Amino acid sequence: MGPANGRQVCQPARVMRNRMTERDSMLLSQVMADLPVEIIRDVSVRRFGPLSIASEGLIQYYSDPRFARQLEALCGVRAIIASPDLGPMVPDDFGLAVCDSPKEMFLKAYLRYGAALEVPEPFPNRIDASARIHPRAAIAEHSVCIGANVSISANAVIHERVTIEDDASIGANSVLGGDGFEVGIVDGRQIVVPHYGSVLIRRGAVIMTNCSIDWGLFGGCTEIGEGSVVDNLVHIAHNVRVGRNCQIIACAMIGGSTVIEDRARVGPNATVSNALRIGCDARVTLGAVVTRDVEPGGHVTGNFALPHSQFIENMRKARP
């Protein structure tokens, strides 16, 4: 990485999406070649993902019967790696590979072919001439789009596959892109699963100092919505989507694949677990630990977070 040079005018920023074609696809048997799996039904696949992703053309793994409902909700062309006892549960129109360690075989295949199937074609950086980039900021050498009047402060790191739309601001020491926390076991060794997705900072968003915003995982995009403000020392995990005019305040942590809808406010030092939905105009009080969805306009408090009025009533009852 190094400071941007030879800047080009940035075209209107777009999310970098994977537009797979038949040319990019592979047979399940090719992806799993030389691995200790039995191919029951072969099929063409285009990328990887967990059972929670409904997109077609995925390789997914099924090793726990607790996720049967997620499997039942899927349709279309896909391939499932399953344990021998769960293989019969996989619909006949899905591709199927059977093995003793489905998740480990999934990860081994992903380490081999994930980048080839999921990383978009690199492109020369597109950086608008009006962008203000501190000399000590580090900008990836390719696949970065920075719009008009963007401000990037000292020691910020902008990795590849990051788009920053017009009028956005990136504070000192903040990092956009990079692997998030997705850990697996391969050959008895703990690994961090590579992230090949992207980051999108919408028009007018403000990312303050010392923030970390992870790349999307399995081809996903981590997005900060138009006009939203992310305060100092905030961590935004992979595939999070933050809506318009939200406030994510200092030291908050937003878990992977969570959706924060328009105008929601997450208070200082709050923790929002993964795969949740925080509704429009909702409020999460400082220090709250959120493990369930918050309805639009809701206000939650505490550990674990409760509706704010219920929390206050519980406090009153607890007084001597």
Image (cartoon, grey):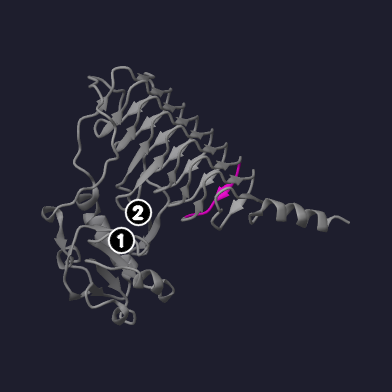
Query: Left or right: where does residue 5 sit relative to residue 71?
Result: left
Q: Could you tell me the amino acid type at mark 2? A: Val
Depth check, front residue: 93 or 31? 93
* Residue 151 in which image quadrant: top left
Residue at figure coordinates x 23%, y 47% from the top left: 18
Depth check, front residue: 18 or 293? 293
Q: Quadrant of the C terminus?
A: bottom right
Q: Could you tell me the amino acid type at mark 1? A: Leu
Would you name the residue on which mark 1 appears? 107
Query: Magenta segment: does it hold 152?
Result: no
Depth check, front residue: 263 or 78? 263
Percent coordinates x, y for residue 133 in the rendering:
36, 20
In primary-sequence order, the first of circles 2 and 1 is 1
* Residue 99 in which image quadrant: bottom left
Percent coordinates x, y for residue 213 in the rendering:
43, 40
Mark number, residue 193: 2
Q: Is residue 52 above or below residue 96?
A: above
Q: Quadrant of the N terminus?
A: top left
Q: Are marks 2 and 1 in contact (CB under 8 Å)?
A: yes
Percent coordinates x, y for residue 57 in the rendering:
22, 61
Residue at figure coordinates x 39%, y 41% from the top left: 223
Residue at figure coordinates x 49%, y 55% from the top left: 276
Q: Which portion, as a residue range, is magenta?
A: 269-274
Q: Main secondary structure of the magenta part?
A: loop
Give the CA separation, mark 2 to mark 1: 8 Å
User: Crowdedness of circle 1 by 10 Å Cα count: few (<14), some, many (20+)?
Assistant: many
User: Crowdedness of circle 2 by 10 Å Cα count: few (<14), some, many (20+)?
Assistant: some
Asked which secondary structure carries label 1, the reply is: helix
